[in-house]
Image: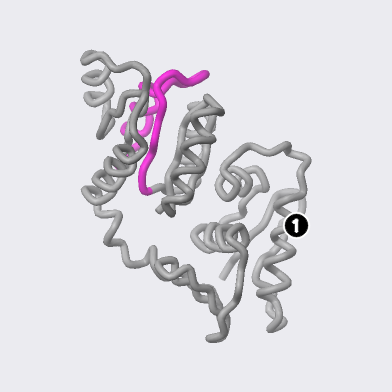
Amino acid sequence: MDVLLVEDDSRISDFLLKGLEEAGYTISLAKSGEEARSLLADFTFDIILMDIMLPGIDGAQLTQLIRYRNNSTPILVISALNSVDDKVKLLDMGADDYLPKPFHFGELLSRIRALIRRSGGLIRQDDDQLSFGSITVDTSLYQVQQNGKDIVLSPTEYKLLVYLLKNKNKVLSRSQILSSVWGINFDSNTNVVDVYISYLRNKLDESGDQVIHTIKGVGYLIKD
């Protein structure tokens, strides 16, 4: 399941990233309303976890923008603002649930599951099976095969491959990949994406077919 986390406090975002990833979710992090709006323009998510007090576009404005675009992705607001008026305002603007800080992580997971279940996210069969040419990925089993042969990937290699396959036929920039796969904003000069793309190519291109294409000066692409 793909989660968009909108949180500018690095201590909170680091805590949530670690816990949610351990629970099996794939996280994309936005540290401002503008970053979240950009990610939502290019990708789809199963749920959005959002703080209210954000730099630039705040959580309330972002909620309105999302709903104005007829985006029905469930929105769970997580905020230190916990008055009844605050809750009513956000729910009226289109948020689906409101969890005040501080909270118990188990309750957060329970609310996420409930919102995704209500939206139908847990019964989307295509989420369990991804394929491209001779490559198949069963996300329910964390299994990758090529021509029927098991391919052993590290956790990061696996997340990178799944992200590329879920966005097949889209050119993905290094910054998009860093945010969605690693979950934090690295220095733009890092070559970690290129290194892991190389790792994947070494494991997937043994048949002689190029799986991952480089778009010079832009990023990477898996295409039909």
As displayed, is residue 54 above or below residue 193?
above
User: Is residue 46 or residue 25 the one in the foreground?
Assistant: 25
The residue under the point 73% across, 72% down is 202
Judge by depth and name the residue closer to the eye, 94 or 16: 16
Report x, y in % for residue 56.
Answer: 51, 19
Query: Taking 147 as reference, is 51 left or right?
Result: left
Judged left or right of residue 94, residue 4 is right
From the top left corner, tell me how far across and down residue 193 is, in percent: 70, 52
Asked if the stretch drawn in magenta spans residue 23, the answer is no
Residue 130 point in image, percent of width and height? 46, 69
Q: Which residues are magenta?
A: 46-72
* Residue placed under numbered mark 1 in the picture: 195
Looking at the image, is 200 positioned above or below residue 98? below
* Drawn side of residue 177 relative to residue 46, left or right: right
Q: Examine the rendering and report whether any part of residue 133 can be seen.
A: no
Who is closer to the viewer here, 184 or 130? 184
Is residue 57 one of those drawn in magenta? yes
Answer with left or right where residue 123 lies relative to residue 12.
left
Residue at 61%, 57% (x, y): give it.
156
